[in-house]
Image (cartoon, rainbow, N blue to C red):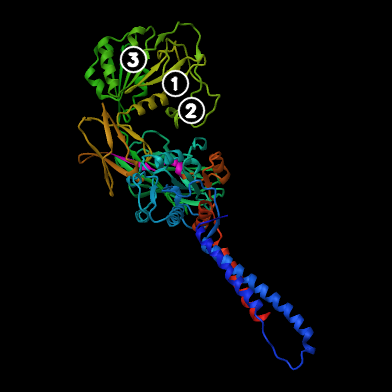
Amino acid sequence: MTFLYPEFLFGLFALAIPIIVHLFNFRRAKKIYFSNTRFLRNIKKSTSQKLKLKHYLILLSRLLFLSFLVLAFAQPFLPSEDKNPQAESVYIYLDNSASMSNRTVSSATGLNQAIDYVTKVLDLYPTNTSYKLLTNDFAPFSNTLKSKDEIEELLTELKQSTISRTFPEAYTRLKSHTLRQSEKSKDVFIISDFQRSTIGNADEWRLDTADQVFVSPISFDATKNIFVDSIYLSSPYLLANEKNQLNVILKNTGDEDASNLPVKLLINELQAASSVVSIPANGTKELNFEIGYNLEKINQCRISFEDYPVTFDNDFYFVLKLEQKINVMEINNGDTKSSVGTVYGNKQLFNYTSQRASNTDYSLIGQVDLVILNGLQQIDNSLSMALNRYVDEGGSLFVIPGNNPDVMSYLSFVPSVKEVKQDTTMVSVSMPDLANPFYENIFENTDEEIEMPTAKTVFSWHGQQMDLLRLRNNLPFLSGFNQNGTIFILASPLEDRFTNFHRHALFVPVMYRMAAISKRTFEAPYYSINSPVIHLKIDSLNKKDIFKLTNQESELIPNQRINANELVLEMPKNSMNPGFYSLKRENEEKTVLAFNLDKSESYLAQMSMEEIKAGFSGDENVMLFAANDSDNFLNEVKKNKFGVPLWKYAIILSLIFLLAEVLLIRFL
């Protein structure tokens, strides 16, 4: 036990006063006159013993009363294990991510409870203490130390953030920027919901041992939530007045079934369809909406439902665009009818042109989305230069070799290509990796017994390629090489004596997907706000062009750069909200983009106290609190930061002994 004001202990010398008073009172003789004292001798003896006991008890009560009164002024306390009792400044990380909108046991939102915690922290320290407040927005105010009044003002303006942060990311930012060179001791408060999906790997939690760290997890009453996991079209091409199907996958992260949940599809803010769905606990459910009629060129779509108490992900935004035709050019020898021309013969989807290699109009190459070299034995230098320039500008090239190709002429496209010695054995193609985004939604099932095409190759290659198809002898059959554009290469000519790939059911979806991702204006239907960059293909770009993102509330100019026909935007995620943004060049709208919160934020499951303790294992400077309201939080911080104060107990005991003295005088 130690004392906050030990100088008050000199007041214990005052204990001599009642002792002296009592001693003098004991020695003072009192004369009592009686006519005859012979009958009073026994009574006098017994009364004298009783008076002595009473005086001693009164003396003891007065001594104890004064002793505990002096101790109360000295403020005794049991010291804490805090190694930093006199912190010069306080650093606070307050997690204000969207998941903090969930309800706690006290029915308050996690964010409001966290703000109450910070308010209690401000009352703990002297008025001259400096504070640093960091939220998920990494706002500029966190770069400077603030006074108590300034922090209180910031708390009144604090809102939920659309950004998720891992603990290492937040702690590194909290500790970054030396705010005061003379600053030696700091208290660090971490207030977060410790969401499993966003907090990061606990093995990477590293703290500065020079600081005293107080960790207070915000515990939710329940972690159930329903959100849109993904959407996709049954047909990748959305055509005007042709029926298509929008597939919506909903996920339930709760431990209870969700029954009869109304779900609406809105297109351009008009309700286009609705459904009622029941989702099993910790399960998913797929909804199907028919669309395709009365669509505009660009359609702003939204999936909407009502799920309480967590509502931040009840709306899911995406954009559907009527497909423009994909421009495809095939360069071949013109000897036979091409299977490529058969695939791309759908005039509603493709503008297909075929040119002979000996008479190619090079000026048309830069105007198409996909160029296909089919069956050429040799590629002359002028065509090779034109195609390399096309790929450097972001174009897509599909190389199908001839039956007796000149390998040297193909090296300008794939430097690692080499000739394969022919044999008469056909080798089966292995089942593709369905986790590859190239095959997303191509297969309705994953039957491993499907009969795959066979081939014998004339080409092989190696390097940093994206394998789309491989043979069972482990040689590549179809690969993609990402440069500024994309080069696809096939290992066999599309001739019956080399392969039956062009006659297989897999050929058409592979060729369609290749054309779709080669579209120069290809865009995803939606993006995450946390996406660092977005790549857009826009025609007629100029290096001096400046693009803006606008909606009804704000206008943003993101960091941007132009690479050939590709626009690269660095997203200003700190300033964005879920919804639709128009991408404009000057006053011309080029496209509309949809943004949603990162899906990981919708998984509300939290780390347990045991897991959090394990994450900070070995850090003696960490104190972990399990408070469920602000008052409990305050008491736990006081106990761990300042120890256990005993002055209240001293006052209570002093009053008890004062009362005892009064009772002794009155009744004994």
Residue at 48% x, 28% y: name it.
434
Tell me: residue 205, above or below residue 453. Answer: below
Q: Is residue 379 left or right of residue 171?
A: left
Where in the figure is residue 97, as x and y percent of width and height? 42, 47
Q: Are marks 2 and 1 in contact (CB under 8 Å)?
A: no
Q: Which residue is mark 2?
A: 434
Mark 1 or mark 3: name the one nearer the start of the chain: 3
| Amino acid at dot 1 | Asp
Confirm whether residue 147 shows in the render: yes
Q: Is residue 553 above or below residue 239?
A: below
Q: Percent x, y for residue 548?
A: 25, 40
Label placed on residue 467:
1
Task: Say which label, 3 or 2, has the lower sequence index.
Answer: 3
Which type of secondary structure does the marked residue at label 3 adopt? loop
- Asked if residue 447 lies in the magenta stretch, the reply is no
* SS label for mark 2: loop
Q: Which residue is mark 3?
A: 413
